[in-house]
Every structure is written in C-alpha cells, then in structure tokens.
Image: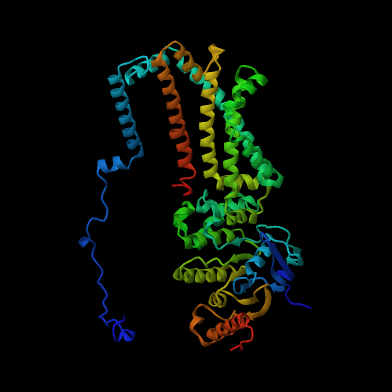
C-alpha cells in the first residue's frame, strides 16, 4: 500500500552551500612512514622465512621425539651431513652433473617448443599438429619412456636428455600456444597496422603479449624436467662415477646413510626453491609485473 | 575536370565477413571520396558496417566487390601510411613505455632513424600533454591518457590518413569532451586527414567537416553532409541543433519504416 499522496511526493528544498577552502594545517595525518613491524609484515620474503622457520622447528622437534637416526634424522644431523657432503663429499659434483644434463634437456625442449608453436601459429595444419601431439604425449609420464630411451640411446646422458625433452616440450608448447591464442585482437591489429608479418610479428607482438602464459609454461616445464631427471637418475643405478643427484640419493639409501639421503633431498628442494624464487621471480619482476600484466 | 584530386577513393565497396554459421554483408556498394585535410566522419547506428568499412580502408579486410584506392594505389594490406586508433584501451603494447610505444611504428616501418623517431615521439607526446608520463608503462595510465598515447603514436608516424574507430566511445563524458576539443586543436595545427567512426550524432557534427550517414543491414550510403562550419562553440546554436535533428530523423526514419520523417 502506498501512502496517500505518494504520487506527488517531493523532497524538501534545502539551502545550497559552498565550503571555504581548507588550510592544510587543519588536516590530520595525510601520510606517515610505516612502523618496522608493519613493513616486515608486508615483506613477502620475511613471511616466507617465518614459514620455513616453523617447518624447521617442527622437523627438529619431531625427529628428536622419534629418536631414530635410521628412518628420520634430525634437522641438525641432516644439515651436518649436507655440509659434510658439500664441502668434502661428492654432493656438489653430483649437483653439477644433474644441472648440466638438465640444462641440455630444458634448452632443447624449449627450442623444439618454439619451433612447434611458431608453425602452429602460422599455419592451420600446424595448429592441428600441435593440439594432436600435445593431447597424445602430454599425459604420458616422461619416466615411462625411460625403458625405451635406454633401448635407443643406451645408458648415459642422451637417454636422460630424451626424457627431459619429452617432459618439457609439451607443457611449454601447450602454454605458449594458449598464450598466443589469448592475445587480444586489438593488439594484433595494432601490430599488423605497423606492417609487421611472419616471424617479426611473432617475435615483436605475439611473444611479449603472451609472455605471462609462456612464463607459466617455462615454470611448469622446469618443474617437470627437474622431477623427471631425479626420478630417472634413481633408476639409473649404473655409471656411479658420473651419476647425478638422484643417483646420490639412491646410493646412500643402499648404504643406509639416511642423513645423506635427507641431505640429497634437501639439495633437490633448495635448487627448486632457488630457481623458482630467484631466477623466475627476477624474470617476472622485470617483465610481466613491470608491464602490469600480472600482479 | 576536377580541380583537386581526392586522397582516398572508396569505389562501390561491398564488404562481407563470416561468423561461425553466417555470411554477413557489412556494407553494400558504398562509395565516397576523402580529400586531404578532411575530417571525414562515418556515422550510423550499430550494424551499418562503419567499423568494417574502416577496417577495409586499413587493409585488414578485402572488399568482395569494388576497390579502395589511396593516392591512386589499391589498398591491399595493412600499412603504417594508414595508422589506426582503436576504441579499446589495450591497443598499446603493455611491455613498452609511452615513449617506446610512440616510437615503435616509426622504427619498425624503417621510415625514421632512431634519433629522429625519438625527437618526433617527444614532440607528439608533448602535444597530447603527456610529457610527464613518457617513461611510464601503459598500465599506469587512465583510459583517456591511453587514447592520447595512441593518437600521438599514430600522428607521429605522419600517416597519409589517420583512421579512428570510435576512439572516445569508451571514455566518460567529461573526458570525451576534452578529447574532442584536443583532437580539433591538433587538427588545426597540423591539418592531417582523418576518417573518424562514431555512432554519436553530436560527436559527428562536432568533430567532422563532412559526414557520411550510413543506413544499417547492410550498410549503404544514406547521405553526405557538410559540418565544416561548426566550431567548438557552435554546439548550442540553432543551426547545430537543426543538423542534429536532420540526421536524427534520417536514422530514425530508417528504424521505423512507414513513419513520417519529422
């Protein structure tokens, strides 16, 4: 029910007013520096360091409570073994061997992905080829190809590089191609308007415009490659002199040097963290974040 | 005999594009001529193919019938002699600063050396009043500023004709007004040739010197009118209102077949 006379309802007429300009002295705090604890809480590195400290503490406490060196050494024992193996033992050597193989496979995988996506983005049959191949091979675990690789390339680096390429190629190609497809039409036309075509168009417009996706692909590819390599090296229990990190872990487990096994795992984690939070983070800060394409 | 040869001929142009399950005729046998220093407006309701027509002139689409000639040469592909300003704000390259964005076409087309391109970029960035923002990336700019950069980028290239596809449509009303005035000021200084697409009658009369009115589905030429005598201050005048009314009725009559013109 509407009130009587609602059809002719009108607001009251009020006085007009214009405020005089405020002198700056009357205003409150317009800006003040943050206190140190406010700044610390805004610092991502500090927050992450805190999480790591809590995890380390939990590990130490649990291991001491369990009190069994053979199955679960304490953090201090692991760090000791880590230090020992790095300074005097073979750990550094093993890490370098692994990283060498990894960079070969990673580089080759990215190069192949670049060729494949360029073909895919310039021709329609190339698009079909890429989508068919990725649909076939992306779900296939790289490690499942290791027996075949051993048959084809024998024991040694070529087999490892082969499985790493397989683990990198499809993830990077798929992400890059998805990124290319998502480049807005306006940006494409702005590029073609300048007269760009072919490879120059791909290099100057598509690649930077799709860079967030490409970077995501590179990150996934890196993680796949690292995982695959360590797993492949665990299987590869043969040429121990030139073995990598995976082999180091396997070897020490056989000798029941559990602290060394943990040290090896710690090395795997630390390398993963460094690559993610130093290398990729730096690339991100100087590219997609600076360009406002990612927060 | 003609005294002045037109810069651009659009000659009986029919443009079609395919959607997923339709073949759409966007414009049907459209003809017009654009002269040097024209502010030529393509005006019409949505669906009259004005943006498609502009894409045809830019070289992104090929006519199925008729031809488009710039300086007597047939338009085959996109090129920096027809720099385009789009409606969307994402036409700037996000990975380049304002200055690098303005320099990009000049360097890529090879028409200017790096030093000259830099000097021209600074000049045109100043002209659109963005001198303070030259080294900023586009994501830090407002919509109006992004459009200013796009205009500076297009003008710095010194194109034969500047193509503008509803460049101010996504801006708020106050900024749009400001941008219209600035465009007219820029034109007054440099007297470039511009083809401007809009669906606002008021904007067409304000910005344009000559207005091509298009009717929709498919786009055909309805009329070509003069608006060169209206300056910035003319908006409230009776003459301005009359032209506004005239165009409005033209487009409105089209939408209601059978209705009387006035």
Image spot of residue A40 (x, y percent): 29, 40
Q: Is residue B163 left or right of residue B28?
A: left
One can see residue B178 in this view: yes
Q: Is residue A76 left or right of residue B66?
A: left
Considering depth in this image, is A86 or A60 the residue closer to the camera? A60
Q: Quadrant of the C terminus of chain B?
A: bottom right
Q: Is residue A193 above or below residue B233?
A: above
Q: Is residue B97 above or below residue A14?
A: above
Q: Residue at x 53, y 31 (%)?
A: A224
Image spot of residue A24 (x, y percent): 24, 62
Image spot of residue A278 (x, y percent): 44, 33
Total residue callouts: 0
Give the colouring mode of the picture. rainbow
Q: Quick one: which residue is furthest to the right in this view?
A: B1
Considering depth in this image, is A108 or B120 the residue closer to the camera? A108
Q: Is residue B113 above or below residue A165?
A: below
Q: Residue at x 72, y 72 (%)?
A: B28
Considering depth in this image, is B22 or A243 the residue closer to the camera? B22
Image spot of residue B244 (x, y percent): 55, 82
Q: Quick one: which residue is furthest to the left in this view?
A: A26
One can see residue B129 in this view: no
Q: Quadrant of the N terminus of chain B?
A: bottom right
Q: Residue at x 30, y 41 (%)?
A: A41
When asked about the image quadrant of residue A54, the answer is top left
Q: Is residue B56 left or right of residue A95?
A: right
């Amino acid at each position: 029910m509407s009130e009587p006379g609602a059809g002719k309802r009108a607001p009251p007429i009020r006085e007009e007013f214009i405020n005089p300009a405020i002198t700056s002295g009357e205003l409150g705090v317009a800006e003040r520096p943050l206190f140190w604890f406010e700044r610390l809480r805004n610092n991502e590195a500090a927050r992450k360091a805190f999480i790591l400290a809590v995890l380390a503490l939990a590990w130490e406490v649990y291991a001491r409570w369990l009190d069994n060196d053979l199955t679960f050494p304490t953090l201090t024992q692991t760090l000791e073994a880590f230090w020992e193996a790095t300074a005097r033992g073979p750990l550094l050597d093993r890490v370098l061997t692994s990283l060498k193989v990894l960079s070969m496979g990673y580089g080759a995988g990215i190069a192949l992905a670049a060729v494949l996506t360029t073909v895919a983005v310039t021709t329609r049959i190339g698009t079909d080829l890429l989508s068919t191949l990725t649909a076939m091979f992306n779900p296939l675990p790289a490690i499942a190809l290791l027996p075949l690789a051993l048959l084809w390339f024998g024991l040694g680096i070529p087999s490892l590089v082969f499985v790493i390429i397989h683990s990198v190629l499809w993830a990077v190609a798929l992400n890059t191609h998805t990124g290319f497809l998502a480049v807005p039409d306006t940006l494409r036309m702005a590029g073609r308007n300048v007269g760009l075509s072919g490879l120059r168009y791909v290099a100057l417009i598509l690649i930077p415009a799709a860079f967030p996706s490409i970077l995501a692909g590179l990150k996934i590819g890196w993680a796949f490659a690292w995982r695959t390599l360590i797993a492949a090296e665990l299987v590869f229990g043969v040429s121990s002199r030139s073995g990598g990190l995976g082999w180091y872990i396997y070897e020490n487990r056989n000798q029941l040097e559990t602290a060394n096994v943990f040290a090896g795992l710690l090395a795997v984690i630390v390398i993963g963290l460094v690559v993610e939070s130093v290398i990729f983070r730096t690339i991100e800060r100087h590219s997609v974040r600076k360009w406002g394409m990612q927060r | 005999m003609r005294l002045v040869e037109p810069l651009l001929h659009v000659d009986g142009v029919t443009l079609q594009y395919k959607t997923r399950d339709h073949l759409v005729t966007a414009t049907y046998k459209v003809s017009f001529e654009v002269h040097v220093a024209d502010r030529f407006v393509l005006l019409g309701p949505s669906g009259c193919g004005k943006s498609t027509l502009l894409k045809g002139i830019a070289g992104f689409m090929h006519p199925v019938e008729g031809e488009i000639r710039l300086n007597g040469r047939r338009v085959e592909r996109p090129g920096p002699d027809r720099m385009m300003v789009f409606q969307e704000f994402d036409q700037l390259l996000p990975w380049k600063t304002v200055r690098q964005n303005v320099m990009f076409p000049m360097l890529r087309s090879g028409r200017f050396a790096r030093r000259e391109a830099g000097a021209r970029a600074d000049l045109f960035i100043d002209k659109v009043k963005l001198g303070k923002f030259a080294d900023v990336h586009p994501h830090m700019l407002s919509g109006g500023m992004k459009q200013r950069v796009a205009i500076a980028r297009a003008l710095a290239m010194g194109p034969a004709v500047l193509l503008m596809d509803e460049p101010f449509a996504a801006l708020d009303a106050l900024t749009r007004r400001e941008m219209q005035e600035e465009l007219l000021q820029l034109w007054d200084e440099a007297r470039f040739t511009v083809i401007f697409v809009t669906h606002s009658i008021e904007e067409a009369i304000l910005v344009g010197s000559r207005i091509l009115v298009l009717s929709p589905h498919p786009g055909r030429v309805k009329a070509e009118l003069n608006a060169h005598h209206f300056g910035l201050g003319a908006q409230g005048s009776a003459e301005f209102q009359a032209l506004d009314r005239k165009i409005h009725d033209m487009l409105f009559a089209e939408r209601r077949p059978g209705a009387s013109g006035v």
